[in-house]
Amino acid sequence: MSVNEVKLRKAEIEFEVRGTGQAGSRTFAIGDEDHTLGNCLRHVLIQNQKVAFAGYSVPHPSEPIVHLRVQTAKGSAKGSTKAGSVGGSSRRRRRAADDDEMDVDAEGDDRMTAVDALKEACRTLSDQCDFVLGAVEEALPEVKEDRERIETLALTGAHDDDDEEEEDDE
């Protein structure tokens, strides 16, 4: 091993939701990821008008984990109404018409949950990647051929690994 070579260890956690209190404010710890995914998700989240803040950090270059912070905006839940009510600051959960959860307090402050905002961002990012891949494969057919060949090899390799395990068991 050379002096400059660093081998990253596997993350202790795959995915973890951190934070208590208001459901519109959470930190997500995503294992075995780096700046690539962190910055992409941050960018997609911040483009969403329902998100008040999105940021990410990589605690240390040798730690294979990304912390993604999401805070949603007040009144960001779909189908939200701003009808004020009198009383204390008790919170309750309610389902919107489209089955997204939202956090509602006595003042009518409803917001999309941070988990729902992250799910929406992941779907958007996946759709964007599919669009770009489709455009590249259309412009360069050899890319599509290579992808299909790799997928076939991966499937074949997975079956070969299963066969080897079965032979080892016998």
Image (cartoon, rainbow, N blue to C red):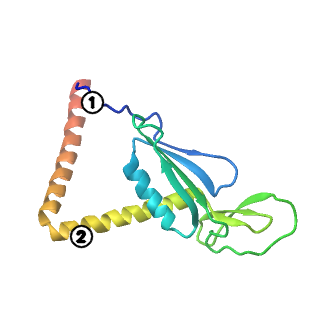
Q: Is residue 135 above or below residue 58?
A: below
The picture places residue 170, in percent across and down from the top left corner, at 23, 24
Please tell me which residue is depicted at 20% across the width and 31% down the height of the picture. Answer: 164
The picture places residue 36, in percent across and down from the top left corner, at 37, 51
Task: Tell me if residue 170 can be seen.
Answer: no
The picture places residue 167, in percent across and down from the top left corner, at 21, 28
Please tell me which residue is depicted at 72% across the width and 63% down the height of the picture. Answer: 104
Please tell me which residue is depicted at 28% across the width and 66% down the height of the picture. Answer: 132
Label 2: how many residues lie within 10 Å, few (<14), some (14-19) or many (20+)? few
In the image, which disc is placed on residue 135? Answer: 2
Quarter of the N terminus within the rendering? top left
154 with respect to 118 (left or right): left
In the image, which disc is placed on residue 151? Answer: none
Under tag 1, what secondary structure? Answer: loop
Task: Tell me if residue 97 can be seen.
Answer: yes
Label 1: how many residues lie within 10 Å, few (<14), some (14-19) or many (20+)? few
What amino acid is labelled 2 in the image?
Ala
Q: Nearer the viewer, residue 166 or 24?
A: 24
145 with respect to 100 (left or right): left
- According to the picture, the residue beneath numbered tag 1 turns out to be 4
Q: Is residue 170 above or below residue 12?
A: above
Under tag 2, what secondary structure? Answer: helix
Q: Earlier in the sequence, mark 1 or mark 2?
A: 1
| Quarter-of-image position of residue 32 | top left
111 with respect to 40 (left or right): right
53 with respect to 90 (left or right): left
Cα distance in 3D space between marks 1 and 2: 38 Å
The picture places residue 43, in percent across and down from the top left corner, at 45, 61
